[in-house]
Amino acid sequence: MRIAMRTASCACGQLRISCNGEPQLVAQCHCLDCQKRTGSTYGVAAFFARDKVEARGDARTYRRSARSGHHVTFHFCPGCGSSVFWEPEQKPEWIAVAVGCFADPAFPAPAHVGWEDRRHPWVSG
């Protein structure tokens, strides 16, 4: 059986993260923090086992508190500003990667949706 190797990158291609295998979870989030992080109405993240990812390139970080009280550390490109991946303190065994950074229309769809009460009423699915 062939294991998928996927690579996500920022808009300029300088910051990359390679992920070996299938994501543990793909989730769509409508929280206000994800809306601000993406500049869109929601974010979509693929969670991979930490030992299955390798990041390359220069990154800057931004750490914030989540509503759970745990912290999340975001890694973004200092050149183009793309938020590529993040480390959720609550799940230290996982690395979350912005699904859009894979630029792959065949990427697995979200199996979980969070913060639906914050969903914009005109957003479907």
Image (cartoon, rainbow, N blue to C red):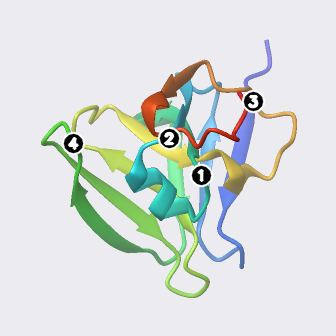
Task: Say which quarter of the image contains residue 51.
Answer: top left
Label 1 sits on residue: 41
Q: In front here: 18 or 102?
A: 102
- The label number, if any, that marks residue 52 in the structure image: none
Q: Which is more N-terminal, label 3 or label 4? A: 3
Q: Residue 92 vs residue 58: left or right?
A: left
Tell me how far mark 3 sits from mark 1, CA to CA: 29 Å
Contact (CB < 8 A) between labels 4 and 3? no
Contact (CB < 8 A) between labels 1 and 2? yes
Query: Residue most toward the bottom?
Result: 79
Q: Which is more N-terminal, label 3 or label 2? A: 3
Label 3 sits on residue: 4
Tell me how far mark 1 sits from mark 2, CA to CA: 7 Å
Task: Say which quarter of the image contains residue 67.
Answer: top left
Q: Residue 82 vs residue 50: left or right?
A: right
Tell me how far mark 4 sits from mark 3, CA to CA: 33 Å
Label 2 sits on residue: 30
Q: In front here: 30 or 28?
A: 30
Of circles 3 and 1, the one toward us is: 1
Q: Which is more N-terminal, label 2 or label 1? A: 2
The amino acid type found where label 1 is placed reads Thr
Q: Residue 52 vs residue 5: left or right?
A: left
Q: How many residues crowd around disc 4 within 10 Å: few (fewer than 14), some, or many (20 or more)?
A: few
Q: What residue is rendered at 23% in x and 60% in y?
A: 64
Label 4 sits on residue: 67
Task: Say which quarter of the image contains residue 94.
Answer: top left
Of circles 2 and 3, the one toward us is: 2
Q: In front here: 92 or 54?
A: 92
The amino acid type found where label 3 is placed reads Ala
Q: What residue is rendered at 79% in x and 11% in y?
A: 1
Query: Residue most toward the top?
Result: 1
Q: Position of residue 57 (x, y in %)?
A: 54, 73
